[in-house]
Amino acid sequence: MIPLFHRPARSVIGSLLIIGAIIGGSAAAFAFTAGWLSSKRLTPQKMLVALAPADGPALGRRRNHAKGICFTGFFEASGNGAAILSSSLVMRGRYPALGRFNLGTADPNATDATVRVRGMSLRLASPGGQEWRMAMIDPPFFPVSNPRAFHDMLIASASKDPDAMKAFIASNPEYGAFAEWAKTAPFTSSYAEERYNSLDSFVFTDDYGVNHTVRWSFLPAATPTLLSSDELAKRGPDFLEQEISARVRTGPPHWTMIATVANPGDPTSDPSRAWPEDRRTVEIGTLVVQRTEPEADGPCRDINFDPTVLPSGIKPSDDPFPAARSSVYRVSYDLRTSEAKDYPRTDPGANK
């Protein structure tokens, strides 16, 4: 059996608990926006407590997706995006890209083969100062439909009550589709072989003022090499970072960015529900990764990949997750930057 996370399965419910733990390290840190706060409701701080491992967070690190590697490169916009979006970042041209490949875990020392969800965070920048920040993962849909359910899932998956996860699943039946994906989807051998999905919906406004609700994905040019459980078990604890670094040195990997446009009536507020495959798609451009660097000294270390940092022409939809994530990202960023001494940069004189 392919290991899914760090805790061994002991029963069917045990397996579900493990999958729940995976989600705790999946898409990102989700919580309620500031407008939802009260003594009985969630705060970013409470969400971070729910995300933390039993022995506490890794100080100085991201509170989620803690293991990762930086990359730099460029985004080659095709110009086709102008059909649905009025933004300088989709006009034909080349724009600097900075990002981070990462694993869905709060443990920066996790063994790669034990973490089910992989992610890519990205920042695109235009000469005029516009920025587009993204946080994407490889599952085709999110496990739950709203931030409240996400928090409840974290609590249930960490509970010692054997019935906690049963009760959560009964209240959130959409979780079943993700659980099935987590148990059956194959692992690939590289970050470069993954499709990364926004999952959340955003609104693009075109030059005529018409709004288009979209989700986007980055499709890999590399053909995936699927690993059996035996093959996966033979890989080293950091094989993903080692492989992507070696791959980039031999030739830059690239991904095609595709925006999928919703039809009227499609579920734009619920990232756990996939849209039909026949929806209109627009090829926005190509991401090319030219260099990787360890995060400790890399250019992505101090970047907050807040998905609500958007260029003109894009705004959040009725999907509650981006704003919720933004509130938790902010608190997480403040915490880890205040703990910089616990995650020191490499001593420049160490190798002399």
Image: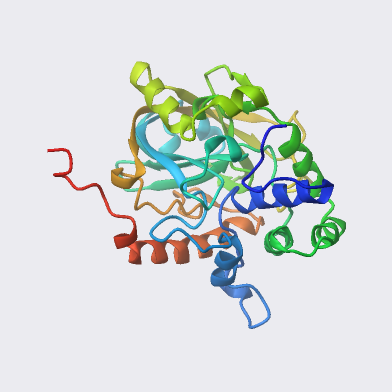
Q: Residue at x 36, y 45 (%)?
A: 300
**The one of 10 and 34 positioned closer to us in this rendering:** 10
Q: Quadrant of the C terminus?
A: top left
Indicate the position of residue 80 as horizontal and vertical percent values: 51, 28
**On the rendered structure, is 96 left or right of 38?**
left
Q: Quadrant of the N terminus?
A: top right
**On the rendered structure, is 176 left or right of 217?**
right
Display colour scheme? rainbow
Residue at the bottom extreme?
39
Indicate the position of residue 58 as horizontal and vertical percent values: 45, 58
Location of residue 252 (image quadrant): top left
**The one of 229 and 24 positioned closer to us in this rendering:** 229
Q: Is residue 269 above or below residue 197?
A: below
**On the rendered structure, is 84 left or right of 95?**
right
Q: Residue at x 63, y 81 (%)?
A: 38
Q: Residue at x 62, y 46 (%)?
A: 6
Q: Residue at x 59, y 60 (%)?
A: 51
**On the rendered structure, is 219 left or right of 297?**
right
**The one of 286 and 22 positioned closer to us in this rendering:** 22
Q: Is residue 271 visible?
A: no
Question: In the rendered picture of this protein, how many numbered marks are placed on residues?
Answer: 0
Q: Is residue 44 above or below residue 16?
A: below
Location of residue 233 (image quadrant): top right
Residue at the right extreme?
170
Q: Is residue 170 visible?
A: yes
